[in-house]
Image: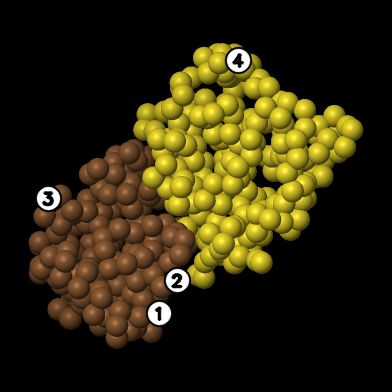
Chain colours: A brown, B yellow
Amino acid sequence: MASPIITLQPLSAYTFTTKAPQPEEDPSVSARLQRLQNNYEDFGMRRSTEAVLLVHEHGHPHVLLIQVASSFWKLPGDYLRPGEDEIQGLSDRLDERLMPDDGMDGGEESGRGGWDISDCIATWWRPSFETFMYPYIPPHITKPKECKKLYLVQPPPKATFAVPSNLKLLAIPLCDLYDGSNRFGAQLAAIPHLLSRYQFVCQD
Amino acid sequence: MASPIITLQPLSAYTFTTKAPQPEEDPSVSARLQRLQNNYEDFGMRRSTEAVLLVHEHGHPHVLLIQVASSFWKLPGDYLRPGEDEIQGLSDRLDERLMPDDGMDGGEESGRGGWDISDCIATWWRPSFETFMYPYIPPHITKPKECKKLYLVQPPPKATFAVPSNLKLLAIPLCDLYDGSNRFGAQLAAIPHLLSRYQFVCQD
C-alpha cells in the first residue's frame, strides 16, 4: 500500500543541444482534425502516447514540456501507426524528437534514449472530430475517435537532449502546472494530480 | 503495461437506509483549523485518508459522495489517530460512517463493510493552518501540517449502506465531477483525472 517511489535526477544532469527543425505535420488545427477524420475512416480510432518526463530543481519535481511558438505547450510523443506497439512507438517518438540524430534518419536505431517507460498515468478520449477531450469515455459515446495515453517516463541518469531548432524544451515546476490550465491547457494542468500518488526521491 | 482493470457494480446492487445523525466534529472551518493547529503542537502532522467508492449507472462510473447541508461535498473518510494504521483506520471510518450500527457503537467490530481498499490514487498536502491544499509539497515547505491520501475502494458486490440522517450519500457521475470545481471543489473535480488510468468493467 506504500506509495511507489520515483527517483528524480537534477535538471543539471542533462545537457541540451539543438538539431534540425521538425515542423508540425499539419498547418492548422482544422487541418489536423480533418486528417484525424480521414485516417479514422481508413484505420479506426487513433491511438496516441505521450511522455511525462520528470527532473527536479531544488527538490521540487519539474515536467519537461515542449513549447511550440510562444503559447502552445505539449508533451513529447505523438500518434501511433495502425498496429504499432504503444511502448515501442513512444520510445521511437522520444528518440526522434529528443535524441541527437548521430547522422542517421531519426528513429532508425530504436532505444537510443534509454527511456524507462513505466506506468500509464492518464488516458484521454476524443469523442468526436473536435478539439475537446475527456479523461473518461463520455456517456452515450460508443466510438471514440482518439485515445491518448500518458506514460510516466524516467530519462536516463545523464543524457544529452537534442531539441529541434523550431521548438523549445523547458522544465516546468509542478506548482506552475497546477492551476495553470489557462496557460497550459486542462491536460497539462492535471499532471500534478496524476503524480501525487508517487513518492519522489531527489538525487543530488 | 496494460491499464489495471476495476470491476464496477451497478448502483442498483446497493440499498440505502438511514441511521442516527453524526454531527460535524467542529462547528466551523476556523474551529477545525484551530484544532488542527492544537493537535499539530501535540502530535505533529495530521494524516487523513478518504475513500473513492465507485459504482456505475448505464456503464458510466459514478463516485459516492457525502453531501453535508446543501452545498458542501466530501468523500467518506477522516483523519487518523496518531500511530493508527492508514488502511485499517480508513476501513474503520467507512464502517462508522456507512454501515448499519447493528445495535453496537460504531467501529467496534472492524471490517464489517468488507471494503476492498486498493491503490492510493492521490495525496494532498496542507502547507499551513489554512484551507488550501496542493497535490504536491510546495517549494520551501519543509513541515506540512496535514497529508491526506485518497484510496480507491471497491465496495462489496452487494451491500446496504446506512447513512447518518444529517447527511446524504449520492452517486455523482464522472462527467459531472469533471469541470465541476466550482460545485465540488478542486480535490473532488480532479477524481476523473486520477481514475483515467484504469479500465472499467461494468457488471449488470
Residue placed furthest toward the right: B103
Q: Quadrant of residue A157?
A: bottom left
Mark 1 lies on residue = A85
The reply to the same-chain question for discs 3 and 2 is yes
Name the N-terminal-most of marks 3 and 2: 3
Name the N-terminal-most of marks 1 and 3: 3
Task: Decide: few, some or many residues near mark 1? Use Cα within 10 Å; few <14, some 14-19, many ≥20.
Answer: few
As drawn, the label of residue A70 is 3
Mark 2 lies on residue = A142
**Label 2, label 1: how far apart the Cα atoms are:** 23 Å
Q: Nearer the viewer, mark 4 or mark 1?
A: 4
Q: x and y percent of residue A159 in the render?
A: 28, 61
The residue located at (52%, 51%) in the rendering is B173
Name the N-terminal-most of marks 2 and 1: 1
**Label 3, label 4: how far apart the Cα atoms are:** 49 Å
Mark 4 lies on residue = B27
Task: Decide: few, some or many residues near mark 3? Use Cα within 10 Å; few <14, some 14-19, many ≥20.
Answer: few
Q: Quadrant of residue B137?
A: top left
